[in-house]
Each structure stands twice: as structure tokens, then as C-alpha cells.
Image (cartoon, coloured by chain):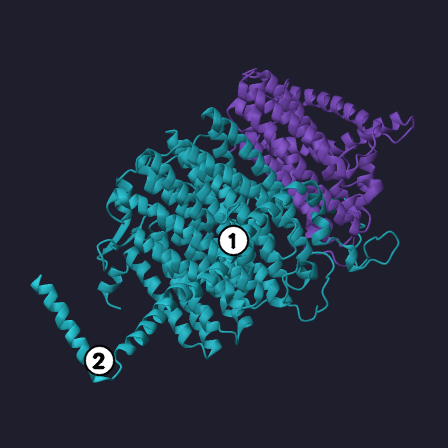
Chain colours: A purple, B cyan
């Protein structure tokens, strides 16, 4: 069980990510505006949007039931639990009892389950299609994620995300090629999980009216938007924690954790800058062709697996 | 009751016999009362409930410790009636009893649906079915094992054909055929072992090793025979047809428990009985491969079903696959002399076996409740039932979350152990195992993601959204006994997940006892660990506490950030439909929801056609055999019997001419005879 200092770190990390999430999504908007050569809103615009939504009325369709009402709460709570278990500021998991790679993937599945179910519950046809797509993307991405992480875990000898990150940071993996290929495959899967173009399938704004979000409004919509922003930061943190752990704190010292925070901020800025450039220079992939894209991920993960097997 | 008889009932095996007696007596009483439906339902249900409660008491106290044996001399030397309640059998008895308890309570209301159609017989077969399943798992003699195995197949066959419609009868025929093909293979396996043991007692099988090439044959025969019972692909063909045909509480027992007897049999043959001759690594790999294929294909086929019970039946194929993954790793561990891996793998399989029984039972009972009110199995004709049947919906949701392996419920815990056992196998195994185990893990992840999709669809299309049926007034919550039945299993789903740190060591102990090795550390305080804490740790109770605690945060954020001027929620705004008037046909349906998967996984559906085609050929061949037999039967008459009778008649008629009636001819006969005799003696 986690002791008090780990618990404090976990709570701080989760709250920090939650607080910073709208800033990150605001940053993405700034990059988009720059690439459109627009003036655009400032990076704080998403905070203002959330506040405004909080004061609006919550309107529900007549067929919506319990699932529709509780989904925003479950979504945010689940993502916060993941945020507590992932090694982001430190090399080790703040709460290792939920920081296992399998647990993390399945906690994301918990969020996905309710997110998609609320789409059907709303009774809207757009939300239903969005829900179906959300889960289909999960089917295409989860095996790639798992295989990539399992290869890294086999190299490190543990499925604990922190232990894998530490092994990679200290160079205690005997097959560097396999690690790099697994990292590429995982990065690809994480990019799809971000829900950005060209893989903006479930919430495709121009196509499906934001999918499962269609019927949400007011404070519920605010909580969901906030959670989705948190999810983007979180999956990036998940990637950096496992495959780019350089700079995070190996112990619980305050200086180390603060330095880890600084380094993480730098990583997030760089990664979201690159992501922003990609998402604004491509168009949406056709949904029916996404399996061809996900095969790329499967291929890379398999290649990493082969390299792991031969031990190169 | 006197003191002595109370003491007598402290012995678990006596309690077990009492439970069996109650089942059988209840079954026959139900059959005798068949003219009075209400009484028959009550007698069968209550007898089942009491028998199951007694059985549960008997088994829970025997989950650890040394096996208890009851040896009664049988009628023949080879048929020693031996019952053996070892930890593995006790676990199976506990699962059977729990499901039977719940199904019996549920049946008190549910069976009224079948009033006037022979409910007395249904109660009889249900009770006999449960009793025979318990006897199969505790029997310790091959002869009695086969007898009870047949009894189980027969009782469930009559439950499958209960509806007597064309589909049920044809599904029943297929089931009957596959079940017997399976038992022939099992019989062959037992006969080979008996040949070396010199006895039909399992105790003798355990100590008499079968020599090397033949033990693989015994294993293959047992694996395929019991695999047909378990419903693994490609021997699953009967399962998605037979389970939906039976009444829902019988389906819950068949899918929840009976197919586990197949798994039990594979463990029994592969680990328990052949343990003496040592395992072979490829047995484990074979089990692993069958498991991986069954899990992926089972869920892929489930996803496109409209029939709720068929969907659940295909999920049984999937979960049997997941259980086989664990069992396979266990067998690899035994063969490669790694007891930690063996215990971990077998424990994962057994844990998932228990969990699947609980949540699949729950889901089948939930489906039964929906069918009880809607009178259809087609999900497309449901929709929005959560508004009128809230408790059924909640139970079904818990079952759906559990089967989708969503943390912190029970399905996740056992799948986590399965992943960990695959990881451990991949970490230190032979090159082939190193290659196979991570692929197994990846396919398990694919299965998990597909299962989430499937159960979002099942729950969503049945219970969420607008209603697509037209008798909304008649649809209301089901009677209390049915809710109690589902509620018990829903609570069990939560307990088996949250109390995993208590449950896992018990099941780990059972796995270790079955393999005959030291127990492996499965938990430390509230933490779960797969043998060692370095590999991974997990704490379902902690995750549950965190989830509940952190759910407060968005609620607080909502109330703080919305300030004082918070508006009331408004309901009733129609969903946006691009400016058109929305109607219920616009919302997600079972077909539309699964359409992407049908498109992306097209080739896998072709595989099903191939398998079905293969089985179709078997069925056609069987029908031809019947036709040939029908044609051959008169042939025997025409070619052998008829000529003989005709020949005898003709000879008689010819002989009649000798007896002409003229005495002079008779005198001539006498003279001729004398001459012949004289000629013979004089010479």
C-alpha cells in the first residue's frame, strides 16, 4: 500500500494535470491559429469556455437515463485515478497498485465504456455512430498498445510502468532496437488515442457533431471537455513516463520532483507542438480505411517483438 | 435432530450427500406434482435452493486441506463407488451450488412463464442436472464419472428441447450428437489409462503413469472430448444454438457451470490424472493456442448477434478461451518444471472460471428477465428498458462491466492474473513459449477491447436510448425472486473483485494443491501480486476507493464553478437530428453499432462459414449414414432372413411330395432303406 508521501505526490500530480489540462488544449488552439495565420484566442481561452459552460443550463434528451447523467463524473474520476498511478513527475509510480500497464489500459477502457454508452443512451443518431467509432478505435489501438508495452515490460522484467521507465532511463534493457521500435509503435497508438486529426473519428466535429458529446450541455459538457483535455495530457504523460523518462525524479525529494515537473512541461510543449503541426497539416482519414493505418502500428509492434526475440 | 446426527452432518462429504438427496427427492416430487404447476414450481425451486445452500456449506469448508474420500463398494469390481472431495472438486461444487442457488430462487417466478407446458418435468430435469454435475466433479472412478457425465448431458438435453419447437429440437439433436462424440473420446482416454492402471479408480490412474507416446494420445483424446463439452472453437458449434434454446435459468447453469465441467475435465486429465507421467510442453501450447483462437473468434461472432442469448452464448466461447489461456500456461509451467508459473497460470484459469460462472449467470438471468417481459430475444425490438426495469438494468450493467474486465470488478482481476501468467511465461520460457505467450497477451487485449464494444452494444441497445417496442405499458420490473437471484450474483461480482486479496490466495492454494506443489504468494495485505511483487502489484479495493473518492471532485467543481446562479436541469429536449423530427429508428441499433467490426474483421466471419461448413459436412455425412442404415435394414431382411424362411418353406413343400399317402410307395421306402443299410453293414 502507498505511504503518505506517495499519496500526497499522487494527489498533487493528478490535481496539477487537471488544472493544467485546459492550458494545454488552449496551447493547441494557439498553434492552430498560428498555422492558419489567424490571430486566434489566447492560451487561456479554454478556461473561459469552461467557466461559461458551467453557468449554462444542463439540458438532457428525453430518453437519457442514469448512464447519461453519471458519465461525466465517471470519466473524470477514472482519468484522475490513472493520473495518480502513472509515473509522470517521478520515475516510479506514485501509486504502484494502479500503475501496472494492464491496469492502466483497462482503466482507460472503463472511461471508454461509459463514454460510448452515454452516446447510445442519449438516443441521438450522431452520438450512436460516435460511440461505435470510439469503441472500434479502441479495438484497433489497444492490442498495439499492449504488445508495445509488454515488449518493454519483458525487457525490464516487470509490468509496472515505473519500473519499465527506470530500466529504459538507466539503459538496463538488452535490446535497444526493440525498445525504440516499441516506443514508435506506442507513440503511434497514443497519437490515435489523442483523438486528433487525421484520427479524430469518434468526436469528429464537422462530421458527427462531436459524437457522444452531441447531446451534452452546460456543466456536464464542461466536465467532459475538461476530462478530454486531461486525457490528452495524460496519454502523453503515459508515453513520456515509459519511453522518455529522462529528467524525471528518481526519488521523492522536493527539488527532484520540481525539476521533473519542469522537464515534463518542456516535453509536453515539444510534443504538443509537433502534434499541432501534424494535426493541422492533414485531413481526416476515412474511417473505413483506419484498419490499414492501425496495421502500421501492429507491424511496428511485431517488428519490435521480433527484435526482442532475437535479442538485438 | 439428535446430537449424533448433527455431528454426523459436520462432515462435508455427508453434507454433500444430503444436498444430493434433497435435489433428487425434490426433482422426483416435482415430477409427481406435474399436474399442479404452482406446487411443482415451488417444490422444485425450494428443493433446489435448500440443496444448493447445503452444497455450498459442504464445499466452502473443503476448499483447503486434505481431500475427503467416501468409498462404497460398487456392484462390480470395476465400479467402485468412490467420491472424493478435494480442493478442486470443492471449488467446482461451490460454483455449481452458487449458480444453482441463484437459479432456483430465480425459477420460483420465472418458470411461471412456462406454466401448462410441463413445468414439473422441467423442475425434475433441473434438479437432476445439478445433482449429476456435482456427482461428476466428485466422482473418483472412471465408470461412475462417465455415468454421471452422461446423466448430465441427458438432463441438459431435455432442458434444451423443452420448447419443442423446430429450432430447439434441431439444436438439441446437434448438442446430443456433439456431447456423445465427446464422451466417446473421453471413454477412450479412460480405457487406455485403465489398461495401465489395472483399475477404473482415479486413484490408480494417478499412480500408474502412461508411457511416453501414448500419454499424449490420452491427453489429446481427453482434451478434445472435454473441449467439445467446454465449447472451444472449432468444437463450439452446438453451444450458440443449444444455450439460447433452453429456459434462461437453465442457460445460466449450462453456460455458467456445465461448460466449466469441460475445463474441469481438461485439468483433471492433463494435470491431475496424467500428472504422474509428467507433462509435455506442447500440451500447454496446444491449450494456449485453442484458448487464444476461441477467445478472439468467440467475441467477434458475439458482436454481430441480434439475439441476446446467442450473443451471451458466444461470449461463453470467448471466456472458455480466456480460461484455457490460464490453464495452458499452468500446463507449460508443470512441463517445464516451474511450479510458480504452473500455480500462477492454473490459478488465473480457475479464478476466471469462478468469475465467468458468476457474471455469465447474472447476464443470462438478466436476459431471462428481459425476455420474461418482452417475449422476444431480438435486441432490435427492445430499447430504453432501464426506465421501466431499473433494477434489472443495474444488475445487467454490473454483469456487463464485469465480463468486459473493467476494473475493479471480478472479471478484471482474473484477466489481470491471466496477463501476468502469460508475462511470466514469456519472461522465462523456452523460445517457443517466449514467442507464443506475448501473442496470447495481445490477442487477449484484442478480446478485451471487443468485449467492451459488445457489451456497450448489448446494454445500450436493450436498456438505453429510445424504446423500439410498442408494449411499453406491459413492461415493468420483474418479480422479487428474480431480482433477488440477479442481485445475489451482482453482489458476488463486486465481492470477487474487491475482496480479491482474500479470494486469490484461496484459489492459489487450490491450484497448488491440484498440481501438488507449494503455494505461491498471491496477495500481501490489500495488494495482489503474481508470485513476486517485482513483477507487478494491483489493489482492486484501493482503485475502488480512489474512484469513489475522486468522483466527488467533478461534482464539487460543478457546484463551485457554476456560482450561485445555477439553473435547474431540463429534460425533454429531443436529440438533434439535423433538423428532422427524431424517431426511434434513428438511434443506434445492434446491427449499425457492430457494422464497423463486421467490415474490418470480415475474413474472420468467413472462417465461421468454413467451420460451419465443415460441421455441415459432418451433419450431412451423418444424415447419409442414417439413410444408408434405413436402406440397409430392409436389405438384411431381403437378402438373409427372407431367403432362409423362403428356403425352409420351399424345402417343406418339396418334402411333402414324398409323403404322398400311397402305402405301396411307403413299402418301397422301407425296402429301399433295408437295402441301403444292408449294403452299408455287409461291406
| Residue located 43% across and 40% down the image | B347
Q: Residue at x 29, y 78 (%)?
A: B657
Q: Quadrant of residue B677?
A: bottom left
Left or right of A198: which side holds B207?
Answer: left
Give the structural element (helix, strand or loop) at label 2.
helix
Q: Position of residue A180 (x, y in %)?
A: 63, 19
Q: Is residue B57 left or right of residue B542?
A: left
Q: Nearer the viewer, residue B247 or B683?
A: B683
Name the chain letter of the residue that bears numbered label 2: B
Q: Tell me the residue that label 1 is attached to.
A: B621
Which quadrant does the C terminus of chain B fall into?
Answer: bottom left
Quadrant of the frame with the N terminus of chain B:
bottom left
Q: Is residue B128 above or below residue B664?
A: above
Neighbour tally class for label 2: few under 14, some 14-19, many 20 plus, Cα within 10 Å: few
The answer to whether tags 2 and 1 share a subunit is yes
Q: Residue at x 66, y 39 (%)?
A: A139
Q: How many numbered discs?
A: 2
Spot occupied by residue B619 in the image (x, y as percentages of width and height): 53, 54
Answer whether residue B679 is visible to the viewer in this image: yes
Give the CA distance from mark 2 to mark 1: 64 Å
Q: Are marks 2 and 1 in contact (CB under 8 Å)?
A: no
Q: Residues within 10 Å of mark 1 (few under 14, many from 20)?
A: few
Q: Is residue B610 above or below residue B25?
A: above
In percent of width and height, residue A276 lies at: 80, 27
Instruction: From the image, tell me which residue sits under label 2.
Output: B665
Secondary structure under the numbered disc 1 in the rendered image: helix
Describe residue A55's horizontal placement relative to residue B255 as left or right. right
Q: In the image, which disc is placed on residue B508?
A: none
Amino acid at each position: 500500500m502507498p505511504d503518505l508521501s506517495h499519496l500526497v505526490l499522487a494527489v498533487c500530480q493528478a490535481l496539477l494535470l487537471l488544472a493544467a489540462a485546459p492550458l494545454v488544449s488552449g496551447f493547441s488552439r494557439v498553434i492552430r491559429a498560428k498555422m492558419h495565420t489567424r490571430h486566434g484566442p489566447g492560451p487561456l481561452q479554454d478556461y473561459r469556455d469552461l467557466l461559461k459552460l458551467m453557468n449554462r443550463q444542463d439540458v438532457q434528451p428525453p430518453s437519457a437515463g442514469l448512464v447519461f447523467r453519471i458519465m461525466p463524473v465517471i470519466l473524470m474520476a477514472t482519468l484522475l485515478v490513472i493520473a495518480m498511478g502513472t509515473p509522470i513527475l517521478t520515475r516510479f509510480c506514485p501509486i504502484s497498485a494502479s500503475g501496472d500497464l494492464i491496469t492502466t489500459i483497462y482503466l482507460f477502457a472503463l472511461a471508454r465504456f461509459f463514454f460510448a454508452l452515454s452516446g447510445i443512451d442519449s438516443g441521438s443518431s450522431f452520438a450512436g455512430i460516435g460511440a461505435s467509432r470510439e469503441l472500434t478505435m479502441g479495438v484497433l489501438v489497444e492490442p498495439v498498445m499492449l504488445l508495445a508495452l509488454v515488449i518493454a515490460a519483458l525487457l525490464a522484467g516487470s509490468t509496472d510502468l515505473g519500473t519499465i521507465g527506470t530500466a529504459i532511463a538507466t539503459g538496463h534493457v538488452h535490446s535497444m532496437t526493440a525498445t525504440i521500435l516499441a516506443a514508435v509503435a506506442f507513440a503511434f497508438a497514443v497519437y490515435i488515442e489523442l483523438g486528433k486529426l487525421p484520427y479524430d473519428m469518434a468526436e469528429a466535429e464537422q462530421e458527427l457533431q462531436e459524437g457522444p458529446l452531441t447531446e451534452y450541455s452546460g456543466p456536464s459538457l464542461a466536465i467532459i471537455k475538461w476530462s478530454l483535455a486531461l486525457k490528452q495530457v495524460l496519454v502523453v504523460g503515459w508515453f513520456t513516463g515509459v519511453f522518455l523518462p529522462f529528467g524525471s525524479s528518481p526519488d521523492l525529494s522536493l527539488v527532484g520532483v520540481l525539476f521533473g515537473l519542469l522537464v515534463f512541461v518542456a516535453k509536453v510543449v515539444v510534443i504538443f507542438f509537433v502534434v499541432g503541426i501534424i494535426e493541422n497539416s492533414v485531413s481526416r482519414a476515412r474511417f473505413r480505411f483506419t484498419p490499414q493505418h492501425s496495421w502500421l502500428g501492429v507491424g511496428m509492434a511485431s517488428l519490435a517483438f521480433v527484435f526482442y526475440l532475437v535479442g538485438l | 435432530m439428535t446430537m449424533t446426527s448433527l455431528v454426523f452432518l459436520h462432515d462435508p462429504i455427508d453434507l454433500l450427500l444430503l444436498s444430493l438427496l434433497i435435489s433428487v427427492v425434490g426433482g422426483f416430487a416435482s415430477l409427481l406434482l406435474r399436474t399442479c404447476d404452482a406446487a411443482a414450481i415451488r417444490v422444485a425451486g425450494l428443493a433446489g435452493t435448500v440443496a444448493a445452500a447445503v452444497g455450498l456449506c459442504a464445499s466452502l469448508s473443503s476448499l483447503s486441506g486434505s481431500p475427503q474420500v467416501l468409498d462404497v463398494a460398487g456392484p462390480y469390481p470395476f465400479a467402485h463407488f468412490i467420491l472424493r472431495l478435494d480442493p478442486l472438486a470443492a471449488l467446482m461444487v461451490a460454483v455449481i451450488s452458487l449458480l444453482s442457488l441463484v437459479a432456483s430462487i430465480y425459477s420460483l417466478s420465472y418458470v411461471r412463464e412456462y406454466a401448462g407446458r410441463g413445468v414439473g418435468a422441467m423442475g425434475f430435469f433441473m434438479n437432476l442436472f445439478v445433482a449429476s454435475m456435482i456427482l461428476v466433479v466428485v466422482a473418483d472412478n472412471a465408470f461412475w464419472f462417465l455415468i454421471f457425465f452422461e446423466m448430465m448431458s441427458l438432463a441438459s438435453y431435455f432442458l434444451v428441447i423443452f420448447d419443442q419447437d423446430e429450432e430447439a429440437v434441431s439444436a438439441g439433436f446437434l448438442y446430443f450428437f456433439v456431447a456423445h462424440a465427446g464422451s466417446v473420446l473421453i471413454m477412450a482416454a479412460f480405457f487406455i489409462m485403465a489398461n495401465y492402471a489395472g483399475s477404473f479408480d482415479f486413484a490408480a490412474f494417478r499412480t500408474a503413469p502412461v508411457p511416453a507416446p501414448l500419454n499424449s494420445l490420452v491427453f489429446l483424446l481427453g482434451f478434445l472430448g472435454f473441449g467439445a463439452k467446454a465449447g472451444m472453437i472449432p468444437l463450439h458449434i452446438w453451444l450458440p444454438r443449444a444455450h439460447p434454446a433452453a429456459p434462461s435459468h437453465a442457460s445460466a447453469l449450462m453456460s455458467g457451470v456445465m461448460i466449466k465441467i469441460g475445463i474441469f475435465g481438461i485439468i483433471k486429465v492433463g494435470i491431475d490424472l496424467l500428472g504422474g507421467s509428467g507433462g509435455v510442453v506442447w500440451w500447454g501450447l496446444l491449450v494456449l493456442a485453442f484458448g487464444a483462437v476461441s477467445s478472439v473468434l468467440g467475441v467477434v461472432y458475439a458482436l454481430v448477434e441480434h439475439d441476446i442469448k446467442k450473443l451471451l452464448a458466444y461470449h461463453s466461447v470467448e471466456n472458455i478461451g480466456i480460461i484455457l489461456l490460464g490453464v495452458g500456461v499452468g500446463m507449460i509451467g508443470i512441463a517445464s518444471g516451474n511450479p510458480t508459473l504452473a500455480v500462477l497460470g492454473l490459478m488465473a484459469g480457475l479464478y476466471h472460471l469462478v468469475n465467468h460462472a458468476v457474471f455469465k449467470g447474472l447476464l443470462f438471468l438478466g436476459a431471462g428477465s428481459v425476455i420474461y417481459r418482452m417475449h422476444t430475444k431480438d435486441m432490435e425490438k427492445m430499447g430504453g428498458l432501464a426506465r421501466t426495469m431499473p433494477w434489472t438494468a443495474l444488475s445487467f450493467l454490473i454483469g456487463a462491466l464485469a465480463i468486459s474486465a473493467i476494473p475493479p470488478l471480478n472479471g478484471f482481476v482474473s484477466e489481470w492474473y491471466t496477463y501476468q501468467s502469460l508475462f511470466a511465461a514469456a519472461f522465462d520460457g523456452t523460445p517457443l513459449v517466449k514467442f507464443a505467450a506475448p501473442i496470447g497477451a495481445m490477442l487477449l487485449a484484442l478480446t478485451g477491447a471487443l468485449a467492451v464494444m459488445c457489451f456497450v452494444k448489448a446494454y445500450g441497445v436493450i436498456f438505453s436510448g429510445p424504446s423500439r417496442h410498442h408494449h411499453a405499458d406491459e413492461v415493468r420490473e420483474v418479480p422479487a425472486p428474480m431480482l433477488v437471484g440477479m442481485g445475489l450474483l451482482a453482489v458476488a461480482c463486486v465481492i470477487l473483485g474487491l475482496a480479491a486479496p482474500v479470494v486469490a490466495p484461496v484459489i492459489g492454494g487450490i491450484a497448488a494443491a491440484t498440481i501438488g506443489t507449494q503455494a505461491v504468494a498471491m496477495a500481501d495485505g490489500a495488494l495482489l501480486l503474481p508470485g513476486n511483487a517485482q513483477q507487478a502489484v494491483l489493489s482492486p479495493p484501493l482503485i475502488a476507493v480512489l474512484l469513489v473518492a475522486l468522483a466527488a471532485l467533478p461534482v464539487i467543481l460543478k457546484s463551485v464553478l457554476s456560482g450561485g446562479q445555477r439553473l435547474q436541469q431540463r429534460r425533454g429536449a429531443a436529440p438533434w437530428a439535423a433538423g428532422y423530427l427524431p424517431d426511434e429508428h434513428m438511434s443506434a441499433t445492434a446491427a449499425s453499432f457492430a457494422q464497423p467490426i463486421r467490415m474490418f474483421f470480415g475474413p474472420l466471419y468467413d472462417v465461421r462459414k468454413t467451420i460451419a461448413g465443415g460441421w455441415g459436412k459432418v451433419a450431412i455425412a451423418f444424415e447419409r449414414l442414417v439413410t444408408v442404415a434405413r436402406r440397409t435394414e430392409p436389405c438384411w431382411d431381403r437378402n438373409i432372413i427372407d431367403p432362409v424362411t423362403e428356403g425352409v418353406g420351399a424345402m417343406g413343400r418339396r418334402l411333402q411330395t414324398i409323403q404322398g399317402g400311397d402305402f405301396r410307395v411307403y413299402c418301397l421306402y422301407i425296402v429301399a432303406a433295408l437295402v441301403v443299410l444292408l449294403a452299408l453293414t455287409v461291406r
